[in-house]
Amino acid sequence: MTRSFWLALSFLVAAPLGANDSISSSRQADLRNLLIQDCGSCHGLQMKGGLGPALLPRMLQGKSAEYLSRVILDGRPGTAMPPWRSLLTPVEARWMADRLLQEDL
Amino acid sequence: MRGILLSFLAFMLLNPAAAARGTGDLGLFIERASSSVQIVETSGNTSIASVDGLGDLSHASVVYSRDARYAYVFGRDGGLSKVDILDAKLSGRTLQSGNSIGGAISQDGRLVAVSNYKPGGVKVFNADTLELVADIPATYGSNQQRSKVIGLVDAPGHKFVFSLWDADEIWVLDMSQQTRPEIQKFKAIGRNPYDALITSDGRYYIAGLFGEDGMALLDLWNLAAGVKRILPNYGRGEQKLPVYKMPHLEGWAVAGDLAFVPAVGRHEVLVINMRDWQEAGRIKVHGQPIFVMARPDGRQVWVNFALPDNDTIQVIDTQSLEIVRQLKPGKGVLHMEFEPRGEEVWLSVRDEGRVEVYDTHTFERKTSIPASKPSGIFFTARAHRIGL
């Protein structure tokens, strides 16, 4: 699957959630890079886990996008997962949570 | 002209019969998006070949065989790959675990050890054949849980030393007798060791702690003394910043008696006096330091940073302890590697898709090599250094 396919799909899937309204396509590219490269530093480039747990869609079944975006924004105290609130808006965190739930990155 | 030189070098490399060649000015860098490495040479600063099919290379690292011909690449997906840098080909590969973080080569070059997250432990392989020699599960506690293993280094006396992230332990593995590995365990060394290093003389093993302040020090010349905590009061009671990337303790940035290490969750580089292991200073830097690396002569220390400051490099003068230069190579500066005598340094600039070479005296950019999400850079001079 090509990247442009997933990009197109992400527009289609995420559109009803209203999250895309306020994220420009260039910011989405930045966020995708952050997700794969920087989240990937601990969770693996393919989200199969590392110091942090695996974040593949099937691993996240039963967890809501709201819950995941809260973890992204506030981190998990007592673990190595930092709060990303100073680098991401709630809308951006939600966009990333949706990517994790819906896509094989 | 460069193209001609490049194809000439590639020709020589790919045709061993055509021309003999040393490996002392060779090395490689990781391209993490394309599961490949580029083989480079530091005399003319060019890329001479590429080898792919190496799996998930997030956080990949490399050690070299003692003849400096083979690079052992440790991938995130548990892959251990042996790359022939003269013939530019993969000469062995084994998927030895589900998830690994790094490795080391033994003093005699016969064994390669890998530290694994899943299943947590260390596996030791024959460096020639990549056959399994020893499997050391990192079990702890009454339930025999397994811990993620970090900070694996080689040490004199056919030893490997490593730390257990979940178990707060340091283990010394003696492989003198390959069929009967011996393990000495040091417990309660401090909460969540995140990485470790060994001094270049192979004497001191030092683990950085993520879960509390200070560092854990083990004197390998005096194991009976046990693990000692150093810098115990560092930052106690202060609110730490979110840590967007774990610092790395690689090699040992030393100038004279002073050692330089990254502070966790702070915009500071710590200076330690190695005579008494007391704090000798804190240097305010641009962001949270990731790598703090000394030029081989020890006169400069180069520092890169975690998000959101990972577009910047700062250079510390080790005599004045002041920052003498700030560079902005571009977004995502992930790693630095000095050429063996330190006149030039290579930087990987991940998000710009470049590896760049800088003159360490003039700070001028000498050249730029296109690369696909480059990360770690490793030169063959590491083959002959303890702990690298």
Image (tube, coloured by chain):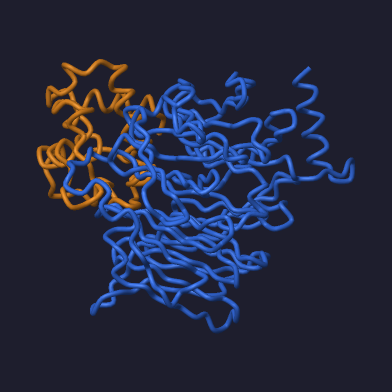
**Chain coloured blue in this rendering:** B
**Residue that extends furthest to the bottom in the rendered view of this protein:** B180
Q: Colour of chain A?
A: orange
* Residue A89 position by quadrant: top left
- Left of B81 or right of it: where is B249? left
* Residue A14 position by quadrant: top left
Q: Nearer the viewer, residue B357 or B200?
A: B200
> Could you say where residue B336 lies in the image, as x and y percent from the top left?
53, 36
Q: Nearer the viewer, residue B49 or B201?
A: B201
State which quarter of the image contains the C terminus of chain A.
top left
- Left of B349 or right of it: where is B241? left
Q: Can residue B100 be seen in this view?
A: no
The residue lying at 44 percent from left, 54 percent from top is: B101
* Residue B136 position by quadrant: bottom left
The residue lying at 44 percent from left, 62 percent from top is: B97
The residue lying at 45 percent from left, 40 percent from top is: B291
Above or below for A78 versus B220: above
The residue lying at 12 percent from left, 38 percent from top is: A70
> Could you say where residue B219 lies in the image, as x and y percent from the top left?
47, 67
Above or below for A96 versus B382: above
